[in-house]
Image: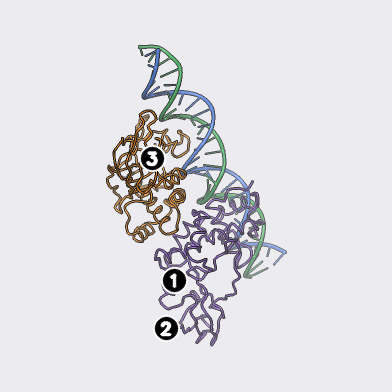
Chain colours: A purple, B orange, C blue, D green
Amino acid sequence: MSEIITQSIQDYLKHIYELNEHGSSASTNDIATRLNIAPASVTGMLQRLANSTPPLVIYKKHQGVTLTKNGEKAALEVIRHHRLLETFLVNTLGYSWDEVHCEADKLEHVISEDFEARMAKALGNPTRDPHGELIPTADLTMPADKSCLLASLRTNETATVRRVSDDDPALLRHLRKIGVVPEVKITIKNYSEFDGNLTVKVEGQKSNVVLGTAVTSQVFVDK
Amino acid sequence: MSEIITQSIQDYLKHIYELNEHGSSASTNDIATRLNIAPASVTGMLQRLANSTPPLVIYKKHQGVTLTKNGEKAALEVIRHHRLLETFLVNTLGYSWDEVHCEADKLEHVISEDFEARMAKALGNPTRDPHGELIPTADLTMPADKSCLLASLRTNETATVRRVSDDDPALLRHLRKIGVVPEVKITIKNYSEFDGNLTVKVEGQKSNVVLGTAVTSQVFVDK
DNA sequence: TCTAAAATTTAGTCTTACCTAAATTTTATT
DNA sequence: AATAAAATTTAGGTAAGACTAAATTTTAGA
């Protein structure tokens, strides 16, 4: 009796998953903003997803949604597709890391499980995509991530860049230029109380850089 | 003012192109059969395509459709995507030639021009896909094809297999097994007047095979 | 605690792309 | 040339997934 999970539904579930990772329950408005559609349209879809068999979300009027086990599996499937695709595009077709997001957003809904498996094998079953984001495993579990925000570091702390947000190409080009990419070590030289700016020494770079919160809130590190 | 060419429209144009290659004008029924939808639905779409700006087809009630220049370009774009994708799946992900059709049918509508260009480059700008079918050029022209049906050959004629129809996986597996693949030389040992069977010597194969018209009408050769 | 602002939901529409059933046109046969 | 069969079109309808405008609920500030 399980209903068809359309492309549109996949997008809802993916974004709800990502919103749930932060503040547990995803609000109608946040979903609407992310999907770039009207909040009213989101309400309609959430009601459908909550009433489908099996239910894909748990939805309480005016209180946002969380994913059910089924919904989460479906979301992780899409996220696995997305991140494997990004890795594949970079490794196999020579895309740079700021060019892959859009392409993967379209392809993720269309590739078969066979395609997914072949990609994973060809890439040597990677655990992270080019931005350092964790790739859900083949059995659809998300590996634990203990990284923290670069913005949370203070003077004299040292850390390793683990992952960066992948949805702003301009930011990605900037990060690449200043050497802030996964697995690179950094040291905080200064923290500015007023604007939250961090002065950072990046491994392999000659001079320090000063990064505002617009940047440091998009970069995750392991201490 | 040009309208959006949806996935569905791309499918119509692709199939109309292929039907036009044979008997010039594509009939409502043939299109419906190929797309596996009701003839009435096809009529509706043909009217839309003929009245769009610019028109994509020339449609005369009860007399079928042909593509306009614009419609043909759009069709060739999709066909180029499809055939490059098939080549890519075989060369890069190890698919066999009977497994690629479905996957390419979904991906062809989704990949970007950038993806197309990167594939073409990575593959060395191939001119034929794994089934030997000609790939439209980057500027969307279809190279001339002078191959003829294997079914049209007679006793003692010799030819080179050029291409085979790609939409029946079982047939493709059979052809692979008997060695009837592009660029292989064959000789007709016998033609049977009654059932159209051909007894064929295939280069590199020990014994001759007898092929019925169900097979010989799907294989194209150069004399 | 009252109220204004923000967030959310309801109600009613629209478009795309399909469907079925009935009507019409074309084609083939006698 | 008449007519039966085949092909096609018309008419009316559905579901998905979006929209806007209006109504309602929640939240935050005085």
Disc 3 or disc 2, which is closer to the eye? 3
In-image side of A57 versus B66 (left or right): right
* Figure quadrant of residue B200: top left
The one nearer the camera, A103 or B93, is B93
Q: Is residue B1 visible?
A: no
- Mark 1 is on which residue type? Leu
* Figure quadrant of residue C27: top left
* Looking at the image, residue A136 lies above or below residue B90: below
- On the same chain, marks 1 and 3? The answer is no
Q: Secondary structure at mark 3?
A: loop
In the picture, the disc for residue A205 is 2
Residue A8, percent from left and from top: 53, 53
- Mark 2 is on which residue type? Gln
* Figure quadrant of residue A90: bottom left
On the image, numbered disc 1 is attached to which residue? Answer: A172
In-image side of B119 versus A40 (left or right): left
How many callouts does the rendering have?
A: 3
The one nearer the camera, A28 or D5, is D5
* Looking at the image, residue A78 lies above or below residue A91: above
- Mark 3 is on which residue type? Gln
Q: Secondary structure at mark 2?
A: loop
Q: Residues within 10 Å of mark 3 (few under 14, many from 20)?
A: some
Disc 1 or disc 3, which is closer to the eye? 3
